[in-house]
Amino acid sequence: MTTAQHVTARPSGPEIPDDAAEGPDTVGAATALLEAYDHRDARFFASATRTLLAHGVRAEVPHGDAPLHRRVTETLDAQLLDGHENPVVVGAVPFLPGAPAVLAVPETVRFAPPLSRDPLAALPVAPPAALDWDVRPVPAPEGYAAAVATAVERMKRGEFGKVVLSRTLELTAPQEPDLTALLGRLARRDPSGYTFAVPSGPGRTLLGASPELLLSKRGGRVVTNPLAGSTPRSADLAEDVRRAAALLESEKDLYEHAMVVDAIRDALAPYCRTLDVPERPTLVRTAAMWHLSTTITADPVDPGISALELACALHPTPAICGTPTDTAREVIGELEPFDRGAYTGMVGWGDANGDGEWVVTIRCAEAEGRTLRLFAGAGIVEQSSPEAETAETAAKFRTFLQAVGVEQ
């Protein structure tokens, strides 16, 4: 595979060793960036490798007909030629192909070690402000269940293999929510996950805490970590363990997960010399869910290929769209009564060397004025139950509902 030639850059941020120990440099460094976030002019991204806080806009990636990764490369190269030593692009890519991405090169970027290595991230946080939220589901739960039933019937007729169907909750408060405090609660609830807050359009902010890495690249190492097949956590320890064990043996969930892993293997194969794909998934947990997880590593043929180009080759995976992809997109358009926008797209950062991290935009909400629009979805296969899938989306809403103080 060939990629556009581009100018070589210096590393965009500090190299954070995977085995870095806690020390004076880590205590308070990541949480300071988290607390300094301001949605009016900042972009925030936290992962297992670093915490990033960016301010201002030096350049925006233009919308156009050229592939997104090429437009990003051209934007970063122009910044290098203009004297910007370490340009980084940060932002969100939407679900639908051809829809405008919201990516920018910030004026300033500050880095810190991961939140998970900052002891201050474990300190208690203030509870959410007592706001009288008006909650409106779109569609209503029974409408969502009916859509699942329709999809299952169509799969039984052989029209497609899988589709991911989503629903939303529209929360409106008497006053604008404190997005900095909301982001802090999301990040501290699961500091080892992927927490983000970036603009998604004029007056809109996309924020969330995703458990799923779409793709990262650092030097010659590529990692992708698909999640597919889920079950809600339980507050009772014995029941929680039982649910986790059952998920590992669930024929329906293992089938759904295998579809995603096979699709990612096939998409990456043309770009890679080697691919290491484990035979069976393992489990990862968030505060609300158990997920089947497979960590795939790869060695690209072209070491200069960018993380974003590889991520675009994967996007959308069957984990957030379905299979076949084009048919699943059509079904989503028919059965979901809203525009996903940035939801189930990708969010992250990339530098002029091609390194970067892009995560799947789930467990998220879009804030606009006094309104928060929450999203949750579930993978539907022929064995799916409308009641179970509706319950799964309700469990996935908990991440955000608890952060804003809404009882489900």
Image (tube, rainbow, N blue to C red):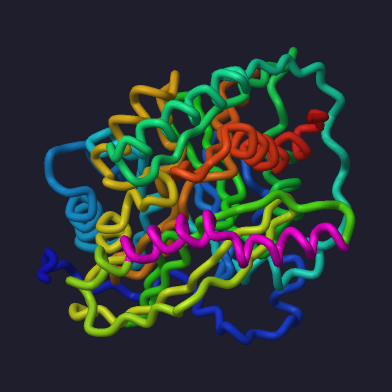
Task: Kindly indicate the quadrant of the structure image that contains residue 59.
Answer: top left
Give the x, y percent position of residue 25.
70, 77
- Work out whether residue 408 can be spotted: yes
Q: Quadrant of the C terminus?
A: top right
Task: Kindly indicate the quadrant of the structure image that contains residue 92.
Answer: top left
Q: Is residue 34 above or below residue 129?
A: below
Q: Could you tell me which residue is drawn at 68 percent across and 62 percent down?
A: 246
Q: Is residue 107 above or below residue 389?
A: below
Question: Is 65 on the left or on the right of 294, as rendered?
Answer: left
What residue occupies the far front of the structure in this picture? 157
Which portion, as a residue range, is magenta? 238-264
Question: Is 11 on the left or on the right of 134, as rendered?
Answer: left
Q: Could you tell me which residue is drawn at 55 percent across and 18 percent down?
A: 143
Q: Is residue 373 above or below residue 399?
A: above
- Work out whether residue 56 can be spotted: no
Give the x, y percent position of residue 64.
16, 37
Give the x, y percent position of residue 20.
64, 85
